[in-house]
Amino acid sequence: MLCYVTCKWYPVTMEHRHAQFIEDVQHMIVRLVATNPPGRGLLLIGGFRYRFLDRAARRSLDVDYHWGGNLAGKQGELLRLFERRLIPEVRQRLEHEGSVRAATGPEADSPAVRIIDLAFWQHNVPHSRIEIPVEITKIVCLDPVEVRTADGIVYPTVSDADMIESKLIALLVRTFVQHRDLVDLFLFSNSLLPDVGKRLGHKLEVLGVSLQTVADRRRSLEQNRTRHARAIEQVVNEQVDADVAANIRAAGGGATILDAVLEVLERVLG
């Protein structure tokens, strides 16, 4: 017996194509770094670490690495690697031209981070330009390096505890709140260890972060709830997989995430 099913086609939006392209290139980047000498000792961290190794529901827009050595030197090594290997691979596989350069500007001049700006586009295709930053930074790690595998490739990374604590520290010390940090804390707060307060206190001391800075950020989150909840909802709408985003909205949206993170801060910081 033959069964005939009527199929309904849905248009693929430009936003969807861009999101898929970014993830395809991010996968190329981390594989390239993990399998070439310039990547030796680099530890995958950040939102794409969660997306790639932990199947996080939030899509990341960049790729982050921890490096304990000279940041500028490692930036130069990766620049040459991407120019030699990544740009041609993207051209061949994804049919996009590309460029790579060291980022400039106030943020790029920070002693704590070096940024590589990758850009890709299609000739004569309007609005096809896509930018993907790769950031090399230093975080305070208390645990040994861990390795995770995917498709037979070994990816060095930090422990789950060091990873989520780095998100907490980023939330507390960034000049401006990046609301993606709150979403990641909401998704992975189960990685916090019972002694997280002691660990976090030690890390903040190493970084020279004052108690006043921590108190000011907590106060800002609490006193500007509506603004922060709306910004979290924007991240959910733009970067979180559709099914998960729908569940978050049904449970209260950005306000629910903000409440959960404030509870974490209360438990951790007292």
Image (cartoon, rainbow, N blue to C red):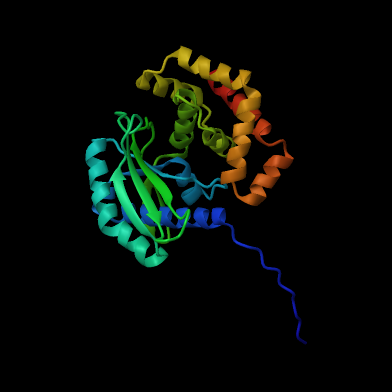
Residue 69 percent across, percent down from the top left: 25, 36
Along the line of sight, the residue nearer the viewer: 10 or 69: 10
Q: Is residue 125 visible?
A: yes
Q: What residue appears at the point 36 percent right and 38 percent down from the top-left corner?
A: 144
The image position of residue 191, as x and y in percent, is 53, 37
Q: Quadrant of the C terminus?
A: top right
Left or right, residue 6 beside residue 52:
right
* Residue displayed at 59% across by 57% down: 13
The answer to which quarter of the image holds residue 117 is top left
Position of the N terminus by quadrant: bottom right
Q: Residue at x 70, y 45 (%)?
A: 247
Which residue is farthest top? Answer: 212
| Depth order, front residue of 257/148 | 257
Residue at 30 percent across and 30 percent down: it is 109
Q: Position of residue 131 (x, y in %)?
A: 41, 48
The answer to whether residue 56 is left or right of residue 174 is right
Residue 59: x and y in percent read 52, 47
Q: Is 52 drawn above or below residue 71 in the view shown?
A: below
Q: How many marks?
A: 0
The residue lying furthest to the bottom in this view is 1
In which quarter of the view is residue 223 placed?
top right
* Snapshot quadrant of residue 232: top right
* Residue 154 makes an appearance in the image: no
In this rendering, the answer to whether 233 lies above or below 85 is above
